[in-house]
Amino acid sequence: MTILCLVAMFTSANAQEILPLENAIALALKNNFSIQLAQKDTMIANNSNTLGNAGFAPSVELIGGYDLNSTNAKQEFISGEVREIDAAKTEGLTGRVQLNWTLFDGFYMFAEKDKLEAFESQSRLQLKADIEENIAQVQIAYFKVVQQARLIESIKSAIDISYKRAEVIEKRRKIGSSSQTELLQAQVDLNKDSSLYYNQVVAIEISKAELNYLLGRDAATTFTTDTFITSVSDLNYNQLNQQLVQQNYSILAAKKQSEISMLMVKQERSKLYPQLDFIANYSGANINSGSGFMSLNQNYGPAIGLVLRMNIFDGNKNRINVKNAQVESEIALLQETELRASVNTQLYSAYQNYISAKKLVTFERKSLQLAQANLDLAIEKYRIGSINQLEFREAQRAQLEADGRYLTAEYQAKANEILMKKLVGRVMQ
């Protein structure tokens, strides 16, 4: 009954819809939250990168006002005449269109435009870094599921062999050529293999849930993957190391941050220079007065001018800000250098693991072939009774372990290949 249940579970799994790696990547790029947030940041940086936002364009504003006053007035003239007016109303209507244009600000606006350019470039690099990171995570998680599924196949094959062995011993026991002890031992081995299968079913369900999370789907979404891990590329460490500084998106984004910090130093220094503004306006006013010498006063017309501003003393705040900006620039350079060293270490470690795993793949493939040949021979010898069940079980165990080691080495080689490609900005190639 146990073996029938196991076969039913396996058949049900195979009936699920197949999810190719390309579809998994497409889903992740569509649904991943970090990528969506990075895309929004890129849109903001792109919208902000304009000459007007940098301060090159003039500003034009419309200003208007209306006043109504009611006052009691007493006026005495030189002639001796006295005039008293109660609740005298004065109405005033004013309006002005004014243009303000900064002609010189110590090159602050030029540094601001360069900074906006750098922000936009940095946001695009960060978006690419997030995409590369997400694709790498999906690929590694996908091939983890493939590895787990193939291990289930291997365990299922072991269960099938153990089940047939138990049937052979049962037949032998009925004719007196095998003992009850041998039958019990065969059933124990079958139960042990069944336990391995159930544990592996849980392992693959967890791996699928982790992949579903990366795809932005419900953890319980069912699917099956391709049945093989794509072949591992031949990678050269020296070439990868040269590409690292030029193509690693995180390093390039950190470099942009260093540029931004230097531009902020320029901006703080620009505040030490005078600022020259051009001002032009067209204004008009209409005032009606219920008292005084004039009952109506109207005026309108254009005006232009220049305004020069220069900070003489502000408690050395500007100079302190310049020094602090220089320190911030040094911090950004240190962070960039630290990131370069960290990424270089990651690349070297991944390459060492990659080389080791590739060697193990070759070695374990040969070991698996030998173990499989030994198991085939043991099955035939056990059938004719030339070896005991302990020797048979040892051959079976050796084959299962060799298969597990081979699958692990194959997965590790692929995972480290993906990691290295991500570090050099090639995971999407």
Image (cartoon, helix red, strand yellow):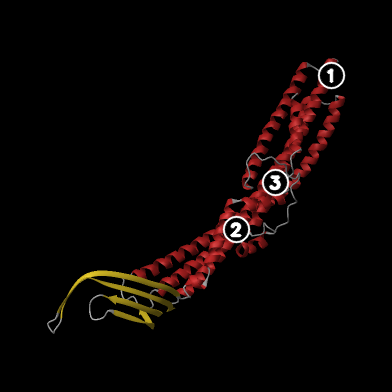
In this orientation, does residue 104 appear?
Answer: no
Q: Position of residue 337 (x, y in %)?
A: 52, 62
Q: CA distance from mark 3 to mark 1?
A: 44 Å
State which tag comes first along the sequence, 2 or 3: 2
Categorize mark 2 by other alpha carbons within 10 Å: few (<14), some (14-19), many (20+).
many
Circle 1 or circle 2, nearest the eye: 2
State which tag comes first along the sequence, 3 or 1: 3
Kindly indicate the quadrant of the structure image that contains residue 220.
Answer: top right
Q: Position of residue 377 (x, y in %)?
A: 84, 33
Categorize mark 3 by other alpha carbons within 10 Å: few (<14), some (14-19), many (20+).
many
Helix, strand or loop under label 2: helix
Kindly indicate the quadrant of the structure image that contains residue 191.
Answer: top right
- Look at label 2 and name its amino acid: Ala
User: What residue do we see at 36% from left, 80% from top?
Assistant: 308
The foreground one among 372 and 39 is 39
The reply, left or right, for residue 203 in relation to residue 41 is right
Q: Position of residue 129 (x, y in %)?
A: 60, 58
Categorize mark 1 by other alpha carbons within 10 Å: few (<14), some (14-19), many (20+).
some
Return the residue at label 2: 129
Residue 143 marker? 3
Marks 1,2: beta carbons within 8 A: no
Q: Is residue 238 above or below residue 371?
A: below
The foreground one among 189 and 259 is 259
- Look at label 1 and name its amino acid: Arg
Farthest residue toward the right? 384
Return the residue at label 1: 172
The foreground one among 293 and 31 is 293
